[in-house]
Image (cartoon, helix red, strand yellow):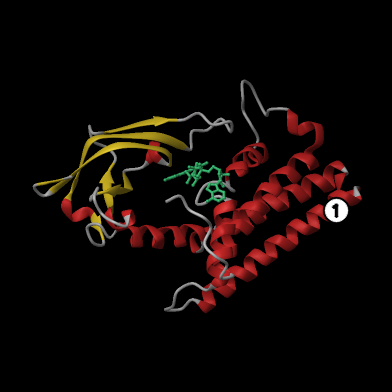
Amino acid sequence: MLEGDEWLLSGQKVWTSGAAWSDWCFVVCRTDPDAAPKHRGISYILVPMRQDGVEVRPIAQMTGDSEFSEVFFDRARTSAENIIGEVNGGWKVAMGTLAFERGASTLGQQMSFANELQQILDIAVANGRAKDPVIRQRIADAWIGLRLQRYNALRMLSGAEGAEPGRESMITKIFWATWHRNLGKLAMDVLGADSEIADGPPYQLSALQRMFLFARSDTIYAGSNEIQRNIISERALGMPREPRPA
Ligand SMILES: Cc1cc2nc3c(=O)[nH]c(=O)nc-3n(C[C@H](O)[C@H](O)[C@H](O)COP(=O)(O)OP(=O)(O)OC[C@H]3O[C@@H](n4cnc5c(N)ncnc54)[C@H](O)[C@@H]3O)c2cc1C
C-alpha cells in the first residue's frame, strides 16, 4: 500500500536466504489486487530489513546452520523510490532476477565445486577408495560434469552479448543442481563409515557433511528440477503448455 511517499508492506515470507545478516531485501508483492492477469498486479520493491516492521526468525537447518529464515512484515516501511521498474510491473523484473540467479550468478560456484571435488579426490586417494572401480567411475563422471558446466558457462557468456540468454542457459540450473546433489552423495560414499561421525560435539559437521546435507536443497530453490524441466519442455522444445487450473 502506498502511503504518502512510502510503501507499507504486510505479510510473511518463508525461506529467505541470508535474511539474518542482510541489511536489505527485495520483495515481490501484490500492489493491485484486481489486476488481470494476476501477474500484472505485482511490484518489485527494495525494503530495509533493520526496522520495527520486519521480524526475522532464523530456521535451524539439518546442516546445523540457519542459512534461511522466516521473515514477517507488519507495516514495514520503504521509500516510494525503492521500487524497481514500474508499479505493477514487477513480474518482468522478477523474471530478470531469476534468470540471473539460475544462470550467470552460479558461475562463481564452479570454483567451490572444483575445490570440493579435489577434496573428495584427495580423500579417495588417501583412504584407498580410489582403487574401487565404481568410485573411480563416479569421480571421473563428476570431473566430466564439472568440465561441462564450465564449457556451458563460457558458451553462455560468449553468446549472450546484448541479447536474451539462449536455450543453453535453460539447462544450467538443473544441471549444476543435480550434479552437486550427486557430488554430496559421492563425498559420503568416499568417506565411508567416517561420513557418519561428527567432527565434534554436539553437532559439529565437516564441510563435506554440510555440503551433502545442503545440496539436497539445490534441486529445490531457485526453481525445482521439475519446474526447470517444464521450462525446457515449453520454451526450448516448444511442447504444449502444461495443464493449469482455471
Ligand atoms: C535452501 C532454500 C533457500 C531458499 N531461499 C529462498 C529465498 O531466498 N527467497 C525465496 O523467495 N524463496 C526461497 N526458497 C524457496 C524456494 O524458492 C521454493 O522452496 C521453491 O521454489 C519450491 O517451491 P515450494 O517450496 O513452494 O514447493 P512447491 O511449489 O509446493 O513444490 C512441491 C513439489 O511439487 C513439484 N511441483 C510444483 N509445481 C509443479 C509443476 N507445475 N510441475 C511439476 N512438478 C511441480 C516441485 O518440483 C516439488 O517437488 C528457498 C528454498 C530453500 C530450500
Q: Tag 1, which secondary structure?
A: helix
> Residue, x 52% and y 68% (percent of image)?
235
Q: Which residue is mark 1?
A: 136
**From the viewer's perspective, is residue 203 above or below residue 117?**
above
Q: Position of residue 169 (x, y in %)?
A: 55, 67
**What amino acid is found at the position of numbered circle 1 in the picture?**
Arg
- Label 1 lies in ligand 1 vicinity (Cβ under 8 Å): no
Q: Position of residue 246 (x, y in %)?
A: 42, 51
Q: Quadrant of the N terminus?
A: top left
Numbered marks: total:
1
**Image quadrant assignment for residue 214:** top right
Foreground pick, 221 / 154: 221
> Residue, x 73% and y 27% (percent of image)?
197
> Residue, x 58% and y 74% (percent of image)?
155
**Image quadrant assignment for residue 216:** top right
Task: Say left or right for 73 vs 225.
Answer: left
Q: Position of residue 78 (x, y in %)?
A: 20, 45
Q: Position of residue 131 (x, y in %)?
A: 91, 49
Foreground pick, 152 / 171: 171
Foreground pick, 128 / 227: 227
**From the viewer's perspective, is residue 38 above or below residue 151?**
above
Residue extending furthest left? 4
Bin the neighbour count of mark 1 within 10 Å (Cα to Cα): few under 14, some 14-19, many 20 and up. Answer: some
**From the viewer's perspective, is residue 235 above or below residue 226?**
below
Task: Say left or right for 33 vs 115.
Answer: left
**From the viewer's perspective, is residue 20 above or below residue 148?**
above
Task: Say left or right for 125 vs 14.
Answer: right
> Residue, x 65% and y 52% (percent of image)?
178
Residue extending furthest front? 246
